[in-house]
Image (spheres, grey):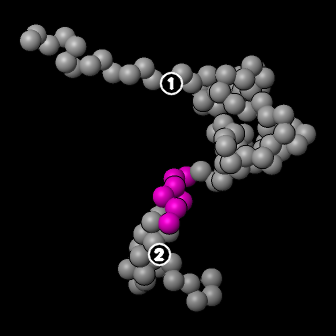
């Protein structure tokens, strides 16, 4: 690096820059590289070309994909994840929304 400030000497400046970035974009450092906004046209979002598929996330509202198969419960997605041996992706494809917790008041005596 030339003129690199990513060192202990500049830790305060670096930490401020990280905090400012997180304030603007809370998920900036959550470990995913996908923006969650693919534009796939021919792959049905089932190939590594799709940034959502390759990151192991489902396509969402921001995506502009055509004929998407990368959505919760998609049989094609489930089969592809099984074929690829991607258990984490398979879990995401078949995830079930958690049921609401039982009410504490429901079993309480009056």
- Disc 2 is placed on an element classified as helix
Residue 8 in view here: no
Q: Residues within 10 Å of mark 2 (few under 14, many from 20)?
A: few
From the viewer's perspective, is residue 3 above or below residue 40? Answer: below
Query: Given the current orientation, which residue lies at the most extreme bottom position?
Result: 3
Where does the image place residue 75, in percent across and percent down from the top left? 74, 19
Where residue 83 sits, quadrant-wise, is: top right
Where residue 100 sits, quadrant-wise, is: top left
Q: Is residue 6 shown left or right of residue 62? A: left
**Mark 2 — residue?**
17
Q: Is residue 28 shown left or right of residue 33? A: left
Q: Residue at x 51, y 55 (%)?
A: 27
Q: Residue at x 42, y 20 (%)?
A: 99
Mark 1 or 2, closer to the camera: 1
Where does the image place residue 103, in percent across and percent down from the top left? 26, 19
Q: Is residue 82 shown left or right of residue 97? A: right
From the viewer's perspective, is residue 74 above or below residue 59? Answer: above
Does the magenta run of residues contain 51?
no
The quadrant the N terminus occupies is bottom right
Image: magenta residue range: 24-31
Q: Magenta residues: mostly which secondary structure?
A: loop
Q: Residue at x 73, y 33 (%)?
A: 70
What is the CA distance from the residue labelled 1 to the residue labelled 2? Answer: 36 Å
Q: Are marks 1 and 2 in contact (CB under 8 Å)?
A: no
Question: In terms of depth relative to the viewer, which is nearer, 17 or 107?
Answer: 107
- Disc 1 is placed on an element classified as loop
**Mark 1 — residue?**
97
Tell me which numbered mark, 1 or 2, is placed earlier along the sequence: 2
């Amino acid at each position: 690096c030339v003129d690199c400030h990513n060192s202990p000497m500049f830790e305060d400046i670096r930490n401020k820059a990280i905090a400012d970035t997180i304030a603007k974009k809370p998920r900036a450092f959550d470990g995913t590289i996908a923006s969650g906004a693919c534009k796939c046209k021919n792959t049905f979002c089932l190939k590594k070309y799709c940034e959502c598929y390759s990151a192991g996330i489902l396509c969402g509202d921001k995506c502009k994909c055509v004929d998407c198969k990368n959505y919760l419960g998609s049989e094609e997605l489930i089969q592809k994840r099984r074929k690829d041996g991607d258990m984490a992706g398979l879990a995401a494809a078949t995830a079930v929304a958690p049921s609401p917790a039982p009410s504490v008041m429901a079993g309480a005596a009056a």
